[in-house]
Image: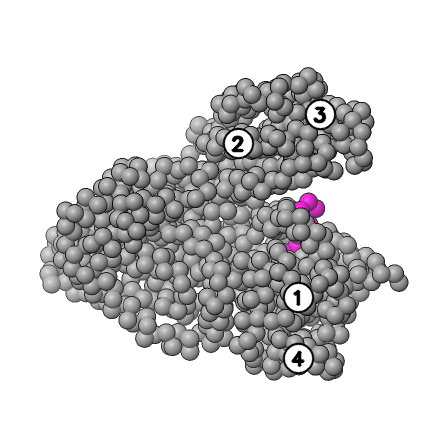
C-alpha cells in the first residue's frame, strides 16, 4: 500500500505503540516482539512507524547508509575512502528516510545477507557484491511478520547479526563485511506455534496485544479502518498533524536521551524487581533501565523515576520469566504482582 | 417438497448470493471459504462464479504444496540463461493481480504458506526477495479456499478463514439443487461500477460491531467485512445507500457462520433461535430484491441493531447451536490447532518439504536439480576465472559447481510425538476423582511442554466420546479445555477407545507418532448403540481394545479407581498397553512410562 495507515490513528494498543516509540528513541534497546490475537493491527503499527520516523543523515554515495557522525564506525568502503583521502570530514551527506524493511516469509538467504550481483555477473562477467536486506535495514528497523514461522536457519542468522551489529558474508569467493545495526521487530500469533526460547530472550521488549472487547473501541477501530480504505489520501492527511506531533516527540526524546539521569535508586529498584521475578541474566535489568530512560526522554523528564520503571517493566520483563507453561495467569500478571509488592498499589 | 428439502435449499441460495457478492468485489470481500468435496455442487458454484466475473479477469488455481518460486516468483532460470541477464518469474500471485485465486485443498495448507498469502493479502503486493531478485509487484486479488475437509478440525488455516468474508458449506447440497440463479452477470457488472459510490450509515458500523460482539466473534475483521459485503449487496440491488435488507444479508452471510455464542436472549424472543426461522430465513433473493418494498418497510420499523443481529443469528447452523448450548465450545473447535509446531525438519527422513542451501553433510541429501540451477547462472564468470588462472581448456566444457551451489532437501520429520489424553469423565470412575485425574493430566502436560510434544484431549461419558481439543502445541488451550470438562453419566468405554484409535490413526497419517494415555477405571456400562448394559458394553470395550492393539499404537492405561481394578488391568492387557494405577501414577512415573514407550520417537535430529 502506497499510503500506510497512520500511526496515530491506531486505536488503543498503547503498550505496543509505546514499545515501538521507545525503540525509535533508543535503538539499542534490542528489538520489539509483538505477540497476540489476529487482526489487532500488529503489522499496521510497524509499517506505520516508517512514516513517523524523523529522517536521518547518510554519507553521500554510501550504499550501506553510513552515519556521517559515527566516527570510525563506517563500512569498509567508507573507511577505505577516508584512508585514501577521497572522503574527508565534514562528509557530504544527504537526508534519507529511516528504513523499515519488511523481511517477507519465503525470502532466500542470498537476499537477506547479500550475494553476488547476478545482473552484473551475467551481463558483464564481473564479481560484485549486491547488498541484501540486512544492509538495507542498517540504522533502521527490520520487521518480520509471523516471526515464529520463519525458517530456523534464517532466524539463527538474524540473531547473530543483530547481536554483533555486523554482517559477514563469505560466499561465492566474496568476503564482505558491513555494519548492520537494526531494531529487530517481530510479530506473530501464539496459536501458530511458540517461539524458540533463545529467540524470545533476544528481544528487548515484548508486547502482548489483545483484541479490544468493548464496543466503543471496536466501533472506532472498524470505522477508522473503513474510512482509511475508502479514501487513503484524505485519511492520512487528516492524521498528518497528529503524526507530526509524535515525530517531534521522538526527535525531542532522542536529543534528550543522553542527558536523562538514572539515579542509583532507580537501578536498585530495577535490580530488586528482577530479583523478585527471578529473571535470568542481566539482560532484563539492563533493558528495563534503558527502556525507563527512553520513556523519561520521550515524556520530557530529566530523571528516571519509579513511574517510568513501572510503566515499562511488563514490556521489558514478561518474556524473561522462567516459564511455567501451565500458569494461566501469564507472565504479565506475575510482573504486575511483583510491581505491586515492590512499588505499592 | 417436504420441510427437510426446503431447509436444504437455503444454503444453496446463500451460496448463490455469496458468489454474486464476491464477484462484485473480490478484493474488498477478500475471499470465500468453500467447504465442499470436489463434485457437481462445487463445480456448479465455481462455474457460476466464473460467469459473474469479468471475462478478462485472471483466475488462477494454486495447487497445494506449491513451491515459493512459483507462488511468489523468483529467478526464471531458462529465460535467464537464454537472455544472459536475470529474468524474474512473476509468480502466480502477481499473475492473479486484479483477479481471483483458487486454493486447492485449502484445509491442508501449511501455516507457512498461509502466512505468505496473508502477507500478500494485507499489503496488496508481493515483496520478492529471492534468488538474487528484489522486486515489489502489485497483487490484489480475492481468494476462494477450496476446503475438502471431512472432520470438524480439518479446515483451512484460521488466518485465511478470518480474512475471507464468506464461509459456505456445500457438503449437503444435492446435485439437483445446485442450479445457477441469483443476480445475472450483467447485474453483477453494473454493481461493480456502482460500488465505489455506495454509502453506509454510521449506525451500520455500530450495528455490525455490536452484533459481532454479542455473537462472540472476537475478530475485528468480521464487522469490517460485513460492512463491505453490505455495500456490495446494496450495489447489487441498485441502491446507492445501504438499506436494512442489505445489512441483514451481510450479517447473515458474514457474521452468522462465525458465531461462537448465542447472544443473551432479549425479552422479545422467548423461543430458541433455531426455531425462529420464518421472519429471517426468507430466501435472500426475496430479501435483497429491490422490488420487495414491503420487506424493507417491515425492517425499517425495527432498530438496525436488531435487524443485523437477527439475520446473523438465523444463519447460525442448528447443530452449532446445539453444541454451543452444551457449552462444549464450537468456539474451541473453530480455532485451528497449532499445527505450526507439528512439522519439524530433519536431515534425512520423512516427506521432502523444500530445499535450502547447504552442504550434503551429516546425512543431508543433495538435491541435484537445485544445485545445478544454482550453478547455472554463474558458468560464464567461472569459466572466465578458470581461463584467467591458466587452467586447462578441456575442463571448461563441464559444469562448474562450487561449494556455494550445493542445495540439500529438507524433510518433514516423522518422529514428533502427539500425546492423546483420553479421559473417562463418567460418573462411575471419575466423578469423585475427576479433579485428581485433571491434576494428573496437567502434570503430564507440563512434561509434554518440556518435550515439545503436541497434545490432544478426548473425553468420554454419557453416550459417547468427544474430541475436546485437536492436536495442538498450545498448552494453555489444553488446560482450558481440561478445566471445562464436565463429569457424570455412563461409561461408553468402547466409544472412547475407538475415538482414541481413529485420532491416533489421523496423527500417524500426519507423520507424527501418537501416544495414547487412557485414564479410566475400565468399567464399561454403555454399549456402542448408546444403550445401557454392562455385559454388552464390556464385550465391546474388549473388541475395541484388541483393534487398538492390532493397530500397534503405544498406549498407556492409567487406572483411576481408588484401588487398582482387575477390569482395568485386563483391558490394558487386551490393548497391549502399559498399566499404571493412579495411586502410584505420579507425574514422573507416567511421564517416564510415556517416554520409554515412545522410545526412539523421542530421538530427533535437528
Residue A17's place in the image compared with B182, above or below, is: above
- Badge 4 or badge 2: first in the primary sequence: 4
- Badge 1 or badge 4: first in the primary sequence: 1
Q: Is residue B430 left or right of residue A20?
A: right
Residue B472's place in the image compared with A143, above or below, is: above
- Badge 3 or badge 1: first in the primary sequence: 1
Q: CA distance from mark 2 to mark 3?
A: 21 Å
In what quadrant of the picture does the N terminus of chain A appear? Answer: bottom left
- Badge 3 or badge 4: first in the primary sequence: 4
Residue A94 % position (x, y)? 22, 67
Residue B381 % position (x, y)? 37, 47
Looking at the rendered image, the disc whose residue lies closer to the viewer, 2 or 1, is: 1
Q: Are marks 1 and 4 in contact (CB under 8 Å)?
A: no
Q: Which residue does the numbered mark 4 point to in the structure image?
A: B300
Give the structural element (helix, strand or loop) at label 3.
loop
Residues drawn in magenta? B142-152
Q: Is residue A319 left or right of residue B148?
A: left
* Badge 1: chain ID: B
Q: Which residue does the numbered mark 1 point to in the structure image?
A: B267
Residue B488, numbered label: none
Q: Are marks 3 and 1 in contact (CB under 8 Å)?
A: no
Q: Are marks 4 and 2 on the same chain?
A: yes
Give the structural element (helix, strand or loop) at label 2.
helix
Amino acid at each position: 500500500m502506497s499510503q500506510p495507515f497512520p500511526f496515530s490513528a491506531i486505536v488503543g494498543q498503547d503498550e505496543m505503540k509505546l514499545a515501538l516509540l521507545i525503540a525509535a528513541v533508543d535503538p539499542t534497546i534490542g528489538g520489539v516482539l509483538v505477540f497476540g490475537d489476529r487482526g489487532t493491527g500488529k503489522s499496521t503499527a510497524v509499517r506505520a512507524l516508517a512514516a513517523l520516523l524523523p529522517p536521518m543523515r547518510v554519507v553521500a554515495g554510501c550504499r550501506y547508509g553510513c552515519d556521517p557522525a559515527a566516527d570510525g564506525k563506517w563500512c569498509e568502503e567508507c573507511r577505505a575512502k577516508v584512508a585514501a583521502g577521497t572522503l574527508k570530514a565534514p562528509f557530504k551527506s544527504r537526508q534519507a528516510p529511516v528504513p523499515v524493511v519488511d523481511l517477507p516469509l519465503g525470502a532466500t538467504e542470498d537476499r537477506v545477507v547479500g550475494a553476488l550481483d547476478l545482473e552484473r555477473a551475467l551481463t558483464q562477467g564481473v564479481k560484485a557484491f549486491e547488498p541484501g536486506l540486512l544492509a538495507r535495514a542498517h540504522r533502521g528497523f527490520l520487521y518480520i511478520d509471523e516471526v515464529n514461522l520463519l525458517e530456523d536457519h534464517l532466524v539463527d542468522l538474524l540473531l547473530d547479526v543483530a547481536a554483533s551489529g555486523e554482517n559477514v558474508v563469505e560466499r561465492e569467493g566474496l568476503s564482505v563485511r558491513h555494519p548492520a545495526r537494526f531494531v529487530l521487530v517481530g510479530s506473530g500469533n501464539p496459536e501458530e506455534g511458540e517461539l524458540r526460547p533463545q529467540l524470545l530472550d533476544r528481544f528487548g521488549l515484548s508486547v502482548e496485544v489483545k483484541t479490544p472487547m468493548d464496543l466503543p473501541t471496536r466501533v472506532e477501530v472498524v470505522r477508522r479502518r473503513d474510512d482509511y480504505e475508502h479514501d487513503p489520501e484524505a485519511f492520512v492527511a487528516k492524521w498528518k498533524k497528529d503524526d507530526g506531533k509524535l515525530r517531534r516527540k521522538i526527535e525531542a526524546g532522542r536529543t534528550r536521551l543522553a542527558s536523562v539521569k538514572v539515579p542509583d535508586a532507580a537501578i536498585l529498584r530495577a535490580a530488586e524487581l528482577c530479583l523478585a521475578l527471578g529473571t535470568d541474566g542481566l539482560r532484563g535489568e539492563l533493558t528495563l533501565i534503558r527502556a525507563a530512560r527512553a520513556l523519561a526522554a520521550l515524556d520530557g523528564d530529566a530523571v528516571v523515576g519509579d513511574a517510568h520503571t513501572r510503566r515499562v517493566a511488563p514490556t521489558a520483563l514478561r518474556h524473561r520469566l522462567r516459564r511455567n507453561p501451565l500458569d494461566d495467569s501469564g507472565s504479565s500478571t506475575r510482573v504486575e504482582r511483583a510491581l505491586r509488592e515492590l512499588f505499592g498499589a | 417438497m417436504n420441510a427437510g428439502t426446503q431447509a436444504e435449499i437455503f444454503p444453496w441460495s446463500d451460496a448463490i448470493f455469496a458468489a454474486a457478492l464476491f464477484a462484485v468485489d473480490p478484493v474488498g470481500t477478500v475471499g470465500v471459504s468453500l467447504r465442499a468435496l470436489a463434485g457437481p455442487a462445487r463445480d456448479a458454484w465455481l462455474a457460476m462464479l466464473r460467469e459473474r466475473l469479468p471475462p478478462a479477469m485472471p483466475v488462477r488455481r494454486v495447487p497445494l504444496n506449491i513451491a515459493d518460486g512459483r507462488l511468489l516468483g523468483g529467478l526464471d532460470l531458462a529465460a535467464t540463461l537464454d537472455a544472459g541477464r536475470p529474468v524474474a518469474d512473476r509468480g502466480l500471485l502477481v499473475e492473479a493481480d486484479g483477479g481471483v485465486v483458487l486454493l486447492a485443498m485449502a484445509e491442508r495448507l501449511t501455516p507457512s504458506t498461509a502466512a505468505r498469502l496473508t502477507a500478500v493479502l494485507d499489503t496488496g503486493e508481493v515483496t520478492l526477495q529471492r534468488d538474487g531478485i528484489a522486486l515489489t509487484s502489485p497483487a490484489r486479488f480475492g481468494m476462494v479456499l477450496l476446503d475438502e475437509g471431512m472432520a470438524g478440525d480439518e479446515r483451512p488455516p484460521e488466518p485465511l478463514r478470518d480474512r475471507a468474508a464468506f464461509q459456505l458449506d456445500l457438503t449437503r447440497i444435492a446435485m439437483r439443487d445446485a442450479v445457477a440463479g441469483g443476480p445475472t452477470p450483467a447485474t453483477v457488472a453494473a454493481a461493480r461500477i456502482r460500488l465505489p459510490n455506495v454509502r453506509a450509515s454510521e449506525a451500520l458500523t455500530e450495528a455490525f460491531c455490536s452484533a459481532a460482539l454479542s455473537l462472540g466473534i472476537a475478530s475485528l475483521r468480521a464487522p469490517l467485512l460485513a460492512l463491505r459485503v453490505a455495500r456490495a449487496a446494496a450495489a447489487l440491488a441498485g441502491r446507492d445507500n445501504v438499506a436494512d435488507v442489505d445489512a441483514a444479508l451481510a450479517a447473515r452471510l458474514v457474521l452468522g457462520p462465525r458465531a461462537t455464542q448465542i447472544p443473551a436472549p432479549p425479552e422479545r424472543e422467548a423461543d430458541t433461535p433455531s426455531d425462529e426461522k420464518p421472519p429471517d430465513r426468507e430466501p435472500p433473493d426475496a430479501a435483497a430484491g429491490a422490488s420487495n418494498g414491503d420487506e424493507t418497510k417491515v425492517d425499517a420499523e425495527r432498530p438496525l441493531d436488531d435487524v443485523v443481529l437477527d439475520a446473523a443469528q438465523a444463519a447460525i447452523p442448528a447443530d452449532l447451536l446445539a453444541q454451543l448450548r452444551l457449552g462444549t465450545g464450537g468456539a474451541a473447535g473453530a480455532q485451528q490447532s497449532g499445527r505450526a509446531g507439528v512439522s519439524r525438519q530433519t536431515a534425512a527422513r520423512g516427506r521432502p518439504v523444500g530445499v535450502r542451501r547447504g552442504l550434503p553433510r551429516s546425512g543431508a541429501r543433495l538435491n541435484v536439480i537445485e544445485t545445478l540451477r544454482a550453478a547455472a547462472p554463474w558458468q560464464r564468470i567461472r569459466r572466465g576465472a578458470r581461463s584467467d588462472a591458466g587452467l586447462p581448456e578441456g575442463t571448461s566444457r563441464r559444469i562448474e559447481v562450487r561449494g556455494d551451489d550445493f542445495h540439500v532437501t529438507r524433510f518433514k520429520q516423522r518422529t514428533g510425538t502427539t500425546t492423546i489424553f483420553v479421559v473417562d469423565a463418567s460418573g462411575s470412575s471419575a466423578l469423585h476423582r475427576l479433579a485428581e485425574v485433571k491434576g494428573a493430566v496437567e502434570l503430564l502436560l507440563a512434561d509434554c511442554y518440556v518435550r515439545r510434544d503436541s497434545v490432544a484431549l478426548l473425553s468420554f461419558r454419557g453416550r459417547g466420546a468427544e474430541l475436546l481439543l485437536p492436536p495442538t502445541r498450545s498448552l494453555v488451550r489444553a488446560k482450558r479445555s481440561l478445566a471445562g470438562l464436565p463429569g457424570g453419566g455412563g461409561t461408553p468405554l468402547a466409544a472412547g477407545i475407538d475415538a482414541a484409535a481413529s485420532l491416533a490413526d489421523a496423527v500417524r497419517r500426519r507423520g507424527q507418532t501418537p501416544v495414547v494415555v487412557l485414564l479410566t477405571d475400565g468399567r464399561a456400562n454403555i454399549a456402542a448403540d448408546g444403550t445401557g448394559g454392562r455385559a454388552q458394553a464390556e464385550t465391546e470395550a474388549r473388541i475395541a481394545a484388541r483393534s487398538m492393539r492390532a493397530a500397534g499404537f503405544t498406549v498407556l492405561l492409567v487406572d483411576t479407581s481408588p484401588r487398582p481394578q482387575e477390569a482395568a488391568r485386563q483391558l490394558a492387557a487386551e490393548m497391549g498397553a502399559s498399566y499404571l494405577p493412579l495411586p502410584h501414577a505420579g507425574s514422573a512415573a507416567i511421564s517416564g512410562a510415556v517416554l520409554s514407550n515412545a522410545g526412539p520417537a523421542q530421538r530427533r535430529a535437528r
